[in-house]
Image: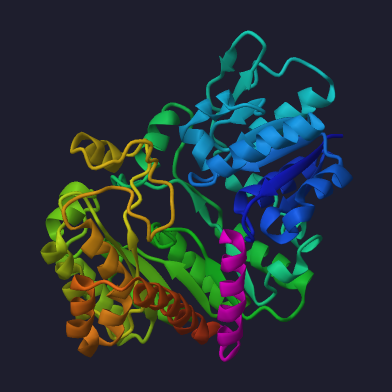
Amino acid sequence: MVKVLFLQRDSYECFGVMYLSAYISQSGHEAEVLIEAEEGKQFFSKISKINPDIIAFSLMSGLHDWAIERAKEIKRRFNIHIIAGGPHCAFFPEFVENEGVDAVCRGEGEDALLEYLSIFDKKGDLTNIPGWWVKTSKAIIKNEVYPLRSDLDTLPFPDRDIYRRRYPFLVSNTCCEVLVARGCPYSCSFCYNQKLKSIYAGKGQYVRRSSVNRVIEEIKNFRQRYGKGLKWVAFVDDLFIMDRQWLRDFLSIYKKEIQLPFGCGLRANLIDEELVSMLKEASCRATSFGVESGDSELRNRVLNKNVTDEQVIAAGELLDRYGIRFSAFNMFNIPGEDLARAQKTVDLNLRIRSHNYPWSGLLQPYRGTQIFDLADELGMIPEGETGADLFHHASLIQKDTEKLKQLNAYFYWMIRLPWLRPILMWLIEHPCGIISKLSLLLTSFHRYVALMYPFEGNAAFIMAIKNGIKRLKAYI
């Protein structure tokens, strides 16, 4: 048996960790998680007390620098075997070259990790396992990715107890988050999806979906294990609605056997009245979809979104008509964008404002994506910039970047309170750091409460305060 300790910087439940823990536990291995934001100065002493055989990082881009520093310190203090995986390592397996890191898993990790642990437990040769880049004294051994698992139903339910054991205050008994599918057929230029599809070429079906019965059973299992306090379900997939026949079958059973409000993600070009009617009848109360930009050239030529203005407006009008709150996702500081073009994003969101509680951020052009390459060719990327940062950080620089940063800070209030637009436009031209930061803080609070209220009622206010404190702890 191998004891694996997953390390995190921030306080949240990571699906990758929960799925990996569930899968390896079936074979007798042990998994725990430790969150630095919660442990503070006791972080390293807790690692020593747990005494794991392997330290593991599941990383998104943006957390890799933190993981590099922690890996060095852990190796210096304890000399524990250290591995890493997650989205960042899928695209940048050269992460293994960093001091302290012994191996990196590239791509989906359940089967690859289990095989690695089995061989590690027997003190065998770790260098020839599919999915792994392994550091030896002489070289880095690079293996092909593990073939994709075609049937998601063969995976166990995610191990939600891994967080509840140590951080019961972190998790919710009122909301069950469910991941229905893996893979996406679209190729937006700001997303890693296109590169991931090329990595897995010839390795199995890329877009996969759990069966209707499997998803229903997962929700029932959650309710059975964690009591009767479950109020709603959050389907966290970007394209929950992609397979229309699957959705019809699922919602038909969901209405009869689950009977809970739910939220999900949509895509404007897939929304029609039949779909919205089905969602409403099954108790969908909040959704989200990407607008990205109100400038159709930026949205479709630069971002490769392939969604028209008319589709965005029709989607907003249908959700309004059926009384479903939604959040339109938007981004600013796209290559070629100036303040005038960004105003089109305000205008388009105002066309759908009634039930729209929009989100916005500055484009983070992650290294390895098409949009990063474009911005780099145009000389917009500062030296050393990875694009992996907070969404109020400007990762590329162009003529109106500072004004676009200010617009991002005030965008939400331009949509919710359009009469403020002239005043906020003046503030964009005459920036005040304190006011813009306060606007971002109030946006986060108000938007969270607005979107959670249909599910949590007045408790949404308390939850917003608690989540705000968690975020502050993570970044102080």
At 45% across and 39% down in the image, what residue appears? 206
Seen from the viewer's position, the closer of residues 195 and 76 is 76
Give the magenta-colored segment's residue range.
456-476
Q: Which picture quadrant has residue 187?
A: top left
Residue 102: x and y in percent read 67, 25
Q: Which picture quadrant has residue 112?
A: top right
Residue 181 shown left or right of residue 383 in the figure: right
Residue 26 shown left or right of residue 473 in the figure: right
Residue 381 shown left or right of residue 259 in the figure: left
Residue 292: x and y in percent read 27, 61
Residue 131: x and y in percent read 58, 27
206 lies above or below 471: above
Whether residue 465 is in magenta: the answer is yes
At 25% across and 37% down in the image, what residue appears? 376
Seen from the viewer's position, the closer of residues 159 and 436 is 436
Seen from the viewer's position, the closer of residues 192 and 321 is 192
Seen from the viewer's position, the closer of residues 108 and 134 is 134
Query: How many numbered markers are drawn?
Result: 0
Characterize the magenta stretch by its predominant secondary structure: helix
Q: What quarter of the picture does the N terminus occupy?
A: top right
266 lies above or below 114: below
Q: Which picture quadrant has residue 279?
A: bottom left
Q: How is the image coloured?
A: rainbow
Residue 22: x and y in percent read 73, 48
Whether residue 138 is in magenta: the answer is no
408 lies above or below 256: above
Residue 282 in sight here = no
Residue 175 shown left or right of residue 378 in the figure: right
